Amino acid sequence: MKVAYVLDDLYSFNAISKIVQMEAKGFISLGWDVYIITSKSKSIDLDISGAKIIDLPLKKKERAVRFYATLKNPFLEKEFAKIVREISPDVVHFHNIHEYFCFSLFKVARKYARRVFYTAHDVMSFHYGKLTEFLPRNIEQMRYDPDLMGYEFDYRVSIFQQIKRFKKRVIPSRRLFIRHYIGHLDRVFAVSNELRKALEANGIANTDVLYNPINTDLYNDVRGDIDKFKDKYNLRNKKVILFGGRISYQKGQNQIIKALIEILKKDKDVVLMVLGVDSVIRSKIMSSYSDLSDHLVLMEYLRGDDLKTAFLSSDLAVVPSIYMDPCPLIIMEAMAYRKPVVATCFGGAKEIVRHKETGYIVNPFNISELSERILDLLSDAKKREEFGQAGFRIIKDNFSLDNHINKLLKYYKL
């Protein structure tokens, strides 16, 4: 059997690249022939022994034309058809393709493959950015209540809302074109139930939920050179909050720093360790919050043992996104490292983190609630241990790579 994965950029440190690599390894272990079709980008060493990687010489489109170019591209369709015809795969599985590739490739793949799937990791099949239109007014004062808040948001977005927010970038017929191309798929996978709701509310049908996987075998050895790491970054005798992912205000950058200010009023031994910080973001953060320099550890993108040790050196992870964040992989990684998580109520986090069992779900706009929940865990080592162990069991039982591959197999072989 042959499967071809298609994604915009395999060479980044983002979650989609990690997930495609995990899926590829899973099917290679089953004896499948695995191909990965991606854009030619910054090359890094990848540990995908056995997979054939096919790079297409594509450039990321400028924002002004990107939403046109990623609908239909006749030249790209022709090149893609040559590749897929030569491979002759049983399955073509797309992951986000709205920056380099185009949605019309769904139709091309349908001509040469028995099964065609698309995993949506965000809302770009009907939107132009991060989904925030559903947020209610006066959200800052609301505290999270699992019985009242966070489950019945209205995710429908009108063309008028989009024009107001994105102006000339909006293509009135874009949704119709994308829905037409999606009609050539066997199934659309949403990485959380909240994302599925958003897709269906905006006309994307034929969806199933397929959560992001974690290879739990990689997390059984929880040892690391923690002492050396803490000495390097001056973390000895500190309580460490880990915040990572693609750093931006929508990921809750401002929320966690505001919470840190409140936390430091009660505990001066707290440090915020931020992962994935480039030089531009570092400069902005340090210039805006120079008075917090002793409590901020800003790191670049970490991989391998360095990333592992960063997690192990932390006391908890926080994910305070202020948009519909579909399924933050960092939550699963933290839980796999047996760390409790304080996470946003917006998006798929509440489907992974069990409130008051493996961490806390909060309204990140409510800084008081966010800081209180973090302080509660920082002040109680026993609770952190119990929450961390419970989180690892949930990840192992429900989100393992083996479970993920077995679910895909049922779809691929139908």
Image (tube, rainbow, N blue to C red):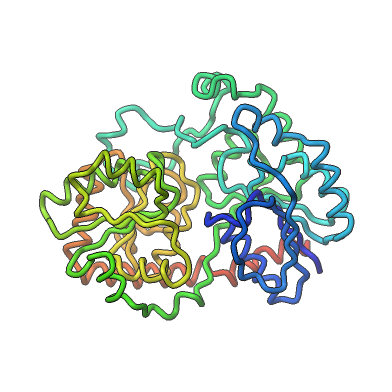
Q: Nearer the viewer, residue 255 or 136?
A: 255
Q: Residue at x 30, y 65 (%)?
A: 314
Q: Is 209 placed above or below 175 here?
A: below
* Left-right relation of 257 to 125: left
Q: Quadrant of residue 288?
A: top left
* Quarter of the rendering occupied by the N terminus: bottom right
Task: Where is residue 328? Give x, y as percent.
Answer: 46, 53
Question: Is residue 178 among what the camera can see?
Answer: no
Question: Is residue 268 among what the camera can see?
Answer: yes
Q: Residue at x 40, y 32 (%)?
A: 135
Q: Quadrant of residue 202?
A: top right
* Left-right relation of 335 to 255: right
Q: Is 208 placed above or below 76 here?
A: below
* Left-right relation of 57 to 314: right
Task: Where is residue 243? Give x, y as percent.
Answer: 35, 54
Q: Nearer the viewer, residue 301 or 413?
A: 301
Task: Where is residue 14? Give x, y as percent.
Answer: 53, 54
**So how many labels did they put on this image?**
0
Q: Nearer the viewer, residue 156 or 9?
A: 9
* Quarter of the rendering occupied by the C terminus: bottom right
Q: Residue at x 68, y 76 (%)?
A: 29
Q: Nearer the viewer, residue 83 or 212?
A: 83
Task: Where is residue 238? Give x, y as percent.
Answer: 19, 65
Q: Residue at x 29, y 42 (%)?
A: 255
